[in-house]
Amino acid sequence: MKVVVLICLLMLAGPVGRAGVEDGAFEQAREIPDASKPTFFQFTTSFGNYTIGNNGVGELGFNGKRRLFYLHTKIRLVGRLRHMYFREYERDLLLLYQVTDGKVYLARMNQESKLVKWFTLIEGTNIGPCAVQGEEAHCGESEETAKIDLKTGKLKSAT
């Protein structure tokens, strides 16, 4: 009887290894414009409500608290954020964003600590469709797809 209960529990739990991870596309954050330029980006994840200014300073609201965070702590953000897409991955937050200088970044942030684990400059691509496929993010148009390892943030290849 114990074995049957254990098997039933394992079947309900689903596949082991990638719990809670599903392949799929990023979603576009809602832009709050001021004079036709985005000033803030807003979106909600299972962790809380995010508001990120076009200067890269963000605020996470959860459980009645508000916490600030910064997208770029290791380098200076040159310009303002123009577009932003997001996706949850293994309880972390993936942020794809374009800066007014034309550069496109993909960042992975721990939602509990609000610390950016890594960010990657995706060169030679416009901000385009981006989707999680297994343990990679595939970003860009079909002729120019960048593949980023979601564990390390390293650019794997461009095809």
Image: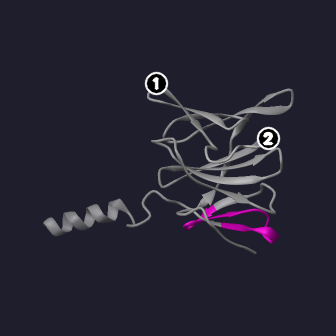
Is 4 situated above or below 87? below
The local secondary structure at tag 2 comes to loop
Query: In the rendered structure, does residue 92 fall within the stretch colored magenta?
Result: no
Q: Earlier in the sequence, mark 1 or mark 2?
A: 1
Quadrant in the picture for the C terminus = bottom right
Tag of residue 33: none
The residue at 48%/55% (across/down) is: 90
Dots 1, 2 in contact, CB < 8 A: no
Residue plotted at (53% across, 60% down): 22
Instruction: Name the side, left or right, on which 77 lies relative to 69.
Output: right
Kind of residue indicated by mark 2: Gly
Residue at (79, 41) in percent of width and height: 79
Q: Nearer the viewer, mark 1 or mark 2?
A: 2
In the rendering, at what x and y percent does residue 45 appear?
A: 54, 41
Q: Which residues are magenta?
A: 132-147
Q: Nearest the camera: 1 or 54?
A: 54
Distance between the Cα atoms at labels 1 and 2? 32 Å
Q: Secondary structure at mark 1?
A: loop
Residue under the point 20% across and 63% down: 5
Identify the disc placed on residue 79. 2
Residue named by callout 1: 64
